[in-house]
Amino acid sequence: MDQTSQLTEFGKILIFLIIGILLVCGTLFLSKVLAPNKPTPLKLTSYECGEEPTGNSWVQFNSRFYVIALIFLLFDVEMVFIFPWTTVFGQKSLLAAEPMWGWLTLIEMFIFVGILIIGLVYVWKRGDLDWIKPEQKLPHVDVAIPKSVYDRINNETYKVKEFSLEGVKPQPEEDTAAVATTSPKPGFKPTFRKG
């Protein structure tokens, strides 16, 4: 007598997810119970990508952090596409059934990896992988305005005026009776079609 599995494929996925959630929650709970809790002012400071947290928290961070992170994600996520390819390419039954299948997948992966290498060379040549740029290049524009004018504008300090209600005249209230008697006409004439 054949016994069929009472657990479907979705049930196996559900059990896998439940076990994963329990393991993560259990690990977090154990670290909360077993870890020593000795806060110091140094430990309570925020840690921002190796930068010393000083000053206002609304400062703009250098864009190199984000560029390096995006480049890492680009080339790291592409590995996700290579793993399924290797499982399909490595199946001897597929290769035995159609030998051209192996050559097609091999050429396809060479094209895919070639595009990734072209992207890596492009990023490398632009200098986005250099953590410390060797020199700062100031853009040069041919204009008739001297550089001293720009320097004077950039070095100028501006004062913000204090807000005050003194000297502000209150607006007269509109007559509500006059507004209520006049009804606005629509700017268009609606037409209805019989369907």
Image (tube, rainbow, N blue to C red):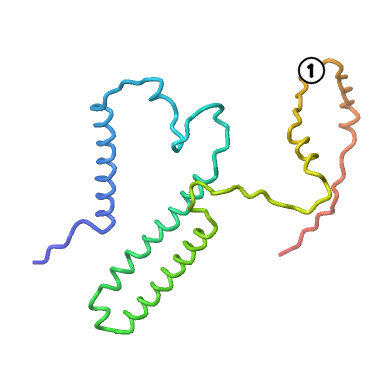
Locate the N terminus and report the quarter of the image it occupies: bottom left
Instruction: Check disc 1 and report its element: helix, strand or loop.
Output: loop
Residue found at the very far top of the displayed protein: 166
Locate the C terminus and report the quarter of the image it occupies: bottom right
What residue is rendered at 58% in x and 48% in y?
A: 135
- Horizontally, residue 47 falls left or right of residue 28, namely right
Q: Is residue 57 above or below residue 129?
A: above
- Horizontally, residue 11 falls left or right of residue 154, namely left
What residue is rendered at 28% in x and 28% in y?
A: 32
From the viewer's side, name the closer residue of 114 and 13: 114
Q: Crowding near pointer 1: few (<14 within 10 Å), some, many (20+)?
A: few
Q: Is residue 69 above or below residue 155?
A: below
Residue found at the very far left of the displayed protein: 1
Residue 189 occupies quadrant: bottom right
Per the image, the residue denoted by label 1 is 164
Q: Position of residue 5 (x, y in %)?
A: 17, 60
- Horizontally, residue 180 falls left or right of residue 123, namely right
What residue is rendered at 87% in x and 27% in y?
A: 176
Q: Is residue 38 above or below residue 150?
A: above
- Horizontally, residue 148 falls left or right of residue 102, namely right
Q: Is residue 172 above or below residue 193?
A: above
What residue is rendered at 30% in x and 73% in y?
A: 89
From the viewer's side, name the closer residue of 41 and 176: 41
Q: Position of residue 78 (x, y in %)?
A: 40, 61
Q: How many marks?
A: 1
Q: Position of residue 148 (x, y in %)?
A: 79, 39
Residue 170 occupies quadrant: top right
Residue 190 occupies quadrant: bottom right
From the viewer's side, name the closer residue of 132 and 64: 132
Under mark 1, the amino acid is Ser
